[in-house]
Image: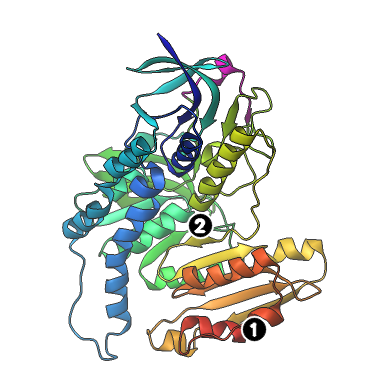
Amino acid sequence: MIDTLDLIVIGAGMAGINAAKKCSKAGWSVAIVDELPYGGTCALRGCDPKKMLRAGAEAVEAAQRLDGKGVVGEVRIDWPALTKHKESFTDPVPESIEGGLSDAGVLCLRGRARFIAENRIAIDGNGEFAFRHALIATGAKPRPLDFPGAEQLIDSTDFLNLAELPRRIVFVGGGYVSFEFAHIAARAGAQVTILDRGSQQLKMFDPDLVDMLLDRSRLAGIEIVTEAALDRIEGANGKHRVAYQKAGENHIAEADLVVHGAGRVPAIDQLDFTAAGIEIENGGVKVTPWLQSPSNSRVFAAGDAAASPGKPLTPVAVFEGKIAASNMLKDKRTAPDYIGVPSVVFTIPELARVGLLEEEARERGEVDVSFTDTSSWFSQKRLGESHAGAKIIAGDGGQILGAHMFGPDAAEFINIFSLAIKLGLTVKQVKSMPAAYPTGASDIGSMF
């Protein structure tokens, strides 16, 4: 039997959930399907559980920074207890999200989905469904790695669910996942190494501040090996030998655990796009600026699965899902506005950016760049922090084009610059903001 739906959403992460609710509340018949628990990567296997674990690392780090400055006694992480703290948030999420979808009138399905025609989909254990519209919002997965022993790596999901933290950990890759998890593991007492094949880490962030982060990471006990070409992983039963080359020489890193931190790709390979005439571009679903498949007009895509200009970030997935839903409901061609979307690497302290990098801004014309090392400022001094800085980029007319920050609470301060860029504010206007004192935000006026 084939049921006909106005919309079927594939993927119960943030993009899919928002789109499904919006269309159902507008009176459409809507179903959502996922083979994994509802909630998506951010809530269950990424952003949120990571930051729950990070809370323990922050407490340890704060005590260590103030050791000898009025704080005494050892503070350490009890990993199993910290994991239970994380689970107090993640465990209720799937039931809560599914309940909210059901209350909104959305049919909730579980199983692996695949297209069988331009307007039909099959779901394991649920049969076949015809649809007027479909939204692909399946998110991303770890990038496949092809070298001997690659199957011995665990991914970010496995790391977040570790019952115990091994003593020696090697992270493969120099991106978000490796640095964020390395900072947690190091504060929890692990011996941590990051192996990255590139010469520049975290390429989407300001290189001057990345250098500051690398120095701070090493100070925290993290070994960072750049231009390391991985050859193979040997060993078994939790004892690994990671073989790599650097500068033409062979090296071995001993590890109890090896973690995949070498990037993610859209999770779309099992959907059988050929049957539906859906095109792929740059590894994701090819879409128009308004998130519609140009080769199958019934189909839209949002979030990490879409080959859109948006960054692979949760806020982007949320507004892309809402805009895709609106375009389907109203038969419109509204393109998302990606201006002013901030990004953060949640190391300790944090690295944040919004807007253009300095190199990107200079390619567009004359700019005014203010780079300030804020390591000795009061905001850092009171915390015992040794590394912090900011770079603000403005155009000819003083309009803020980019903001880059490294230091305590940079993830919060960057939101002020996000709003400034979104509204087209100038340096003068931002500097005129009266801020509560003494707060970190009160430093902003002195960063230009």
Q: Which residue is mark 1?
A: 431
Q: Residue at x 57, y 82 (%)?
A: 444
Please give left or right for residue 174 compared with residue 278 in the image: left
Q: Secondary structure at mark 1?
A: helix
Res. 374 in view: no
**In terms of depth relative to the viewer, which is nearer, 255 or 62?**
62
Do tag 2 and tag 1 residues touch (Cβ < 8 Å)?
no
Q: Position of residue 381 (x, y in %)?
A: 42, 88
Helix, strand or loop at label 2? It is loop
| Residue at x-position 81% and y-position 73% | 396
Instruction: State which quarter of the image contains the C terminus.
Output: bottom right
Which quadrant holds residue 153? top left
Residue 264 lies within the magenta run = no
Where 9 sits versus 433, above or below?
above
Q: Find residue 207 and report its horizontal and vertical position in percent.
A: 60, 66
For badge 1, the amino acid type reads Lys
Q: Position of residue 179 (x, y in %)?
A: 43, 59
> How many callouts does the rendering have?
2
Q: Visible in this render: residue 279?
A: yes
Quadrant (top left, top right, bottom left, bottom right) of the N terminus? top left
Q: Residue at x 57, y 17 (%)?
A: 276
Compute the Cα span from label 2 to label 1.
Answer: 39 Å
Residue 173: image x %, image y %? 47, 50
Whether 277 is among the magenta residues is: yes
Please give left or right for residue 187 compared with residue 317 in the image.
left
- Magenta part of the protein: which range? 270-280
Location of mark 2 (residue): 226
Q: Residues within 10 Å of mark 2 (few under 14, many from 20)?
A: some
